[in-house]
Image (spheres, grey):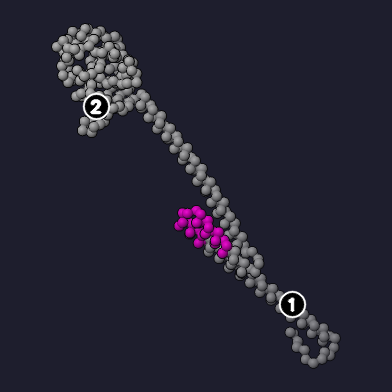
Amino acid sequence: MSKKFKGEIESIDEAKELFYGLAEDRKQERRAVKEAEREAKRLAKEEAKEEARRLKEEAKHKEAEDKNTESSTDDTVDETSSVNTVSAEISDGEIPEGETEENEQGEGKKRKYKGRKKKEKVNIVRELYYLGIYIGVVIIVCFLIITFIGERTTVVGDSMNPTLQDGDNLWIDKISYRFSDPKRFDIVIFPPRNNSEKIYIKRIIGLPGETVQIEENGDILINGKVLVENYGAERIEPEKRGIANSPITLGKDEYFVLGDNRNNSEDSRSSRVGNVKKKEIIGKAVFRLSPLSKFGKVK
């Protein structure tokens, strides 16, 4: 106080002076209290901002180390809760600016996580789409190869011994004859006329326009001349000459075929097979795939 009361007040002026002094002291005390409260609030806000900044840095560090998006999101939520708790204790019911910023950041990270999850779903759909296209292309390519280029086939029977044996796996070239004509001694496959579901494999002996005949001694004549070859397993027996015991003239697109196992083969000597037209030839055997001991080109 500006004056201390001692005894009785002697006059009105003295009473006024005492009253005004007391009022001024009270006013200064209230001003000091308000100033102290404002300073305390300012310090609390600064501390809350600093705490929020620290927690934000920790969250970023954890997110960089941890690639698990869900775990990262949970950490962010927990950290936001911690900021809320600290801010509530300091501000005495007042929400600091740092807490508001951290809440907004938390919401932003949640939205970012949802967007990332949606993007991952879109990526999976895209990958499945491309996988479907890839499988479709592979199927189409395989179909084109099998239909127009080549295919694998297995020898059944002994009609081509000793060149080919039962169970041999062969690769058949189906495209060469689209650009060139079959040649003598090519090994070809074709369906017999009496059974389109069955496939024969034989060697070409006579070419279009030639005359083929098998003599009683087993010699093969092409246009009256003996054919020099060593593919036959043995000389043809007289009773195995079939319709070739008389001269056979081939048409412009016909081929005369024989099995290498000459006395145990159904081929052009049989009326059930006869001459083979070019359009009936599926392809030629070019490669033996198995057995591995005989792996290589077919001759």
Q: Amino acid at mark 2?
A: Asp
> From the viewer's perspective, is 72 left or right of 191?
right
Q: Amino acid at mark 1?
A: Lys
Q: Secondary structure at mark 2?
A: loop
Query: Where 271 sits versus 121, above or below?
Result: above
Query: Where 37 sits versus 109, above or below?
Result: below
Q: What residue did someone put label 2 on?
A: 166
Give whichever of 85, 2 is nearer the camera. Answer: 85
- Please tell me which residue is depicted at 54% across the width and 62% down the height of the picture: 79
> From the viewer's perspective, is 16 left or right of 284?
right
Corner quadrant of residue 158: top left
Which labelled disc corresponds to residue 126?
Answer: none
| Of the two numbered discs 1 and 2 in the rendering, the one whose residue sits closer to the viewer | 2
Which labelled disc corresponds to residue 27?
Answer: 1
Query: Where 33 sits versus 267, above or below?
Result: below
Q: Work out whether residue 177 can be spotted.
A: no
Residue farthest toward the front in the current orientation of the protein = 239
- Please tell me which residue is depicted at 53% across the width and 56% down the height of the picture: 73
Q: Position of residue 241 (x, y in %)?
A: 20, 12
Q: Position of residue 134 (x, y in %)?
A: 42, 35
Q: Which residues are magenta?
A: 57-82
